[in-house]
Image (cartoon, rainbow, N blue to C red):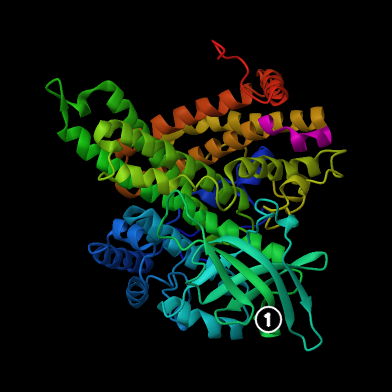
Amino acid sequence: MEAATTEQDHPPVEGVSSFAKSLFLGEIHEEIVFPYPLPDPGEQDKIRALTGSLREWAEDYDPYEVEEKRWIGDGNIKTLGERGILGLYIPEEYGGQGLSQMGYCRVSEVFAQIDATLSVIMGVHQSIGMKGIHLFGTDDQKGRFLPDLASGRKLAAFALTEPNAGSDVHGMETVAEKQADGSWRLDGVKHYIGNGSKADVLVTFAKTGERHTAFILEKGMKGLEVGHRFDTMGLLGNDLRRLEFKGIRVPPENVLGEPGDGFKIAMHILNTGRLSLGTGSVGGAKRLLDLTIDHVRERKQFGIPLADFELVQDKVGWMVSYLFGLESMAYLTPALVDMGVPDYSLESAICKVSGTEFLWYAANRALQLKGGAGYMKDEPYEKTLRDIRIFPIFEGANDVMRAFIALTGMKPLGEELEGFSDISWNDPIGTIGVLADYVGGRAQRAVRPDSITMAHPELKSLSDPLTDQVKRLRDVSEGLLRKHGKEIMVRQFQQKRLADAVSDIYAQIAVLSRVSSIYAEHGVEPSGQEHYIAETFCTRAAQRVNGQLDQVEHNDDERMIAISKLAYKRGEYGYAFFED
């Protein structure tokens, strides 16, 4: 995808492949993220037109009818295609809208505001289903597939997960063998595949010797069999299927990328797919917040509006301030893609983890404020909770993602430190992968500031503490490497602390960049509300960072391990107050 034009020109990205990984080295490459990037005015107009069209279409959309019928409806797919919604980032030459990654994420946020099921179906089609063809397809493959996919004449899917290979892609059992005529014979099983029986084009992956290869399958291929539909807790309109590959003949022109590059392709697709999970969480949280505000302003208890109670204000204030931080980070990350930053894998993982967990907690708090009525099926909260519970699990379970964030973040630091170059960093998290190797050592890059100098002076009290936070992140990470060596690969308590700390650091920087740009456009005085929210978010985030890093040395990890092992040994809780 070509880099998007932004309203402010950013200098070329040189000498660093990942903004977030640099933080582990104690470096803040602020020139990458300041000023806060926006799509150019022309694309902004196109985004507004598309979101307006999508909202207009949604006026007749009934999410409960979708649940009842167990599918969004082929007619809706056709209509969305006609409105240009199904090929948002596809180049115009193939019938798409040609949006930047940020533009795509902004439109797809509206899917989540309308209905989580709609968001997932559209995400399977665009975020991961046809993404590989867009990124890695030949000109012939793009010409054959993208016009129909962008128009809604065909639907896409992505088949990676298997019964014995979820987070562990290296455990994949599907195999493809090259035949004498140049074709491939594909055998295996995939499951939990969204759009499973509806997809006309399906990108899948198989072992080919010691490596993996990506293939484009088409509906009607002999040996492609659609299995049973999974009965799920939520997202009932998502056609989630088991797929069986029984000797499918895949012609050589349907190999995606080079043979053996399948792992890299899959990980690249998932990294970009997580971006829309972050902004989708923003959209879902906005809808919940709007519902909550309407309710607490109207509902009275003891003659007083709910909105006037402090514990209600605590929940609403938390939702607003955290959402501002998440939104700032979630849209900065696709902008990095548009700017050509080679490796955004950590940033997309951070957005996925932070976004999906915030959305879950926000939904619980919104239901709590609705009271007993929120527990009723005729309110949207019950469906929302069922639908979004899977979000922290799919496209990389959040526990696995935290390990990925910490370990790949520490990788450049470990390579820089003497005696750590032989650590096999990717083994425990091989399914997640890394998009690009870190570029060189610190000595090979230009010296970068370890403090924020480009934030607006009015934000100095918020930007100055980041210097110490980033320095501590490096020092603590280095200390853990020196203490544990290769054992750091299994120290998941510490991995979680580092992952959460770097996430809050990244979010603070995103907020400072965003508010600095707001000041530049509107002035400081008219932007008092944004300053107030930024101050709240950054202060709390800084406290969380320091708390996580403090716990690296002062914790009760050994006690928790011992208690869990006793429970395993007992095979039960074992401490009943009164035995039966």
Question: Which residue is depicted at the point 27% across and 60% down?
Answer: 62
The residue stretch that appears in magenta: 485-494
* Of residues 457 and 114, the one drawn nearer to the viewer in this rendering: 114
Residue 189 vertical position relative to residue 560 in the rendered view, above or below = below
* Of residues 222 and 203, the one drawn nearer to the viewer in this rendering: 222
* Of residues 314 and 92, the one drawn nearer to the viewer in this rendering: 314
Quarter occupied by the N terminus = bottom right
Residue 277 vertical position relative to residue 407 in the rendered view, above or below = below
Q: Give coordinates of residue 553: x percent, y percent.
A: 69, 20
Q: Quadrant of residue 38?
A: bottom left
As for residue 493 lying within the magenta part, the answer is yes
As for residue 373 lying within the magenta part, the answer is no
Relative placement, left or right, of 405 versus 428 is left
Residue 49 vertical position relative to residue 569 in the rendered view, above or below = below
Quarter occupied by the C terminus = top right
Q: Quadrant of residue 47?
A: bottom left
* Of residues 38 and 494, the one drawn nearer to the viewer in this rendering: 494
Label 1 environment density (alpha carbons within 10 Å; few <14, some 14–19, many ≥20): many
Relative placement, left or right, of 574 versus 324 is right
Q: Give coordinates of residue 304: x percent, y percent.
A: 14, 23
- Residue 411 in view (yes/no): yes
